[in-house]
Amino acid sequence: MRVYFDNAATTAMDDRVIEAMLPYMKLHYGNPSSVHSHGRQVRSAIEKARKKVAELLNAAPSEIFFTSGGTEADNTAIVCGIETYGIKHAITSPIEHHAVLHTLEECAKKGKIKLSLLDVNPKGEVDLQQLEALLQANPNSFVSLMHANNEIGNINDIETIGELAKTYGAFFHSDTVQTMGHYAHDLKNLPIDSLVAGGHKFHGPKGSGFLYVKKDKKIHPFIHGGAQERNMRGGTENVIGIIGIAKALELAYEDMDGHRKHIESLKSRFIELLKENIPGIEFNGKSADLKKSLYTVLNVSLPPSEENRGMLLFNLDLHGISASGGSACSSGATVGSHVLRALGHDPERESVRFSFSRFNTAEEVDYTVEKLKELYTVNV
Ligand SMILES: Cc1ncc(COP(=O)(O)O)c(C=O)c1O
């Protein structure tokens, strides 16, 4: 059996997304900036995709900018939000994705901003009182706090954070890469200035994404060049990526509740079976709390075991199970997770992130627990 439980890293593309993209590879190859009919046909498809994304998120089409993914969208919002508004102080947390953390650290290194990191407790909760105190002390700050954490699944209350930011006149950006397509976002009513998406996290193509920027918080472009994306992102558009991400989002919204119920049932089955079968199992962050964590992520901390030390992901892979030890972008590398480190996680314990999609099954959960049990019964 081959099991894919690394959906927070990337997801399999939905066949219907591929079908929607194919004509733009085979037939409609015009450059959307060309004024002839080949170009106009493709331009119209891009604008239709933008309208669809905007409709689903209750935003205006003029607030959506297509990018190459979540990383570029985060970089754009952060670097250009800070520049446009002459911001000198930014606030984030040590458990953000590197797309946010490294970008802000770079801004600080260049002397553009002073960077404040919020405290996080061992459960991965950020200190919102500290956030308020920092906002009070530093008017015109930039706040970047993610909606849901990609490693431990903790969900931040972005409404409360957004209201706080608004009260103290801060720019609020949220990395929503892990919730886009899995939770409904109502952007007209959410106090948020910018957020981002990566299409490959919800069965769309890799290298596709978008940035949302609220109408009244316009920012400068990040990539200069042609007038594409209304002068916000130079470069010929990734047409197939744009068609693909819009279709993937449409499909995600078509049956979001159904997908959620299915995935939640897999996650709670997984938690129960692990508790029954692996003595000493723990769960990192709040990932075992179905109400307070991303339903697609379960981060498991296993008891110390000499045989599995540093080898657990490899051992799972030998049994056909693909999971990861932290963020996708650093899985494969031997560096530990900065998120688990910030939570003070015991390095003697192996951690595995299992992340699910609507394509997973209960049989896959049962098989994985059975294999984990074998690994831990034989080896402990
Ligand atoms: C929370 C979060 N932000 C940003 C990214 C980067 O997105 P992309 O791969 O689309 O550049 C990821 C991808 O793992 C993520 O999980």
Image: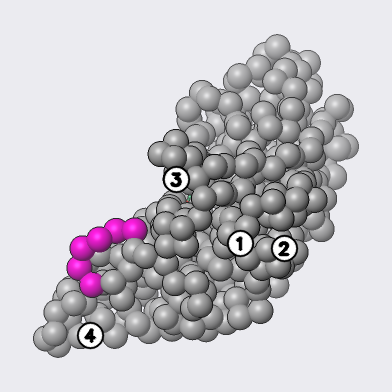
Q: Quick check: is 119 in the magenta stretch?
A: no
Mark earlier in primary sequence (3, 2): 3
| Pointer 4 or 2: first along the chain | 4
Q: Earlier in the sequence, mark 1 or mark 3?
A: 3
Q: Which mark is residue 41?
A: 4
Check the image and report above or below for 29 versus 207.
below
Tell me where the magenta segment starts and ends, as one range: 222-227
Q: Are marks 3 and 2 in contact (CB under 8 Å)?
A: no
Q: Quadrant of the N terminus?
A: top right
Q: Mark 3 is on which residue type?
A: Lys
Numbered circle sitting on residue 164? 2
C-alpha span from label 2 to label 1: 8 Å
Q: Which part of the image, by quadrant, shows the C terminus?
A: top right
Disc on the earlier residue, 3 or 4: 4
Residues at marks 1 and 3, CA–CA distance in whole angstroms: 16 Å
What label does residue 243 carry, if any? none
Distance between mark 4 and mark 1 Cα atoms:
41 Å
Q: Residue at x 53, y 66 (%)?
A: 194
Pair 4/2: label in front: 2
Q: Which mark is residue 112?
A: 3
Q: Amino acid at mark 2?
A: Leu
Which of these two is toward me, 270 or 284?
284
Gap in angstroms between the C-alphas marked 4 and 2: 44 Å
Task: Give the number of the disc on residue 170.
Answer: 1
Mark 1 is on which residue type? Ala
Real-space Cα distance between discs 3 and 4? 43 Å
Residue 6 quadrant: top right
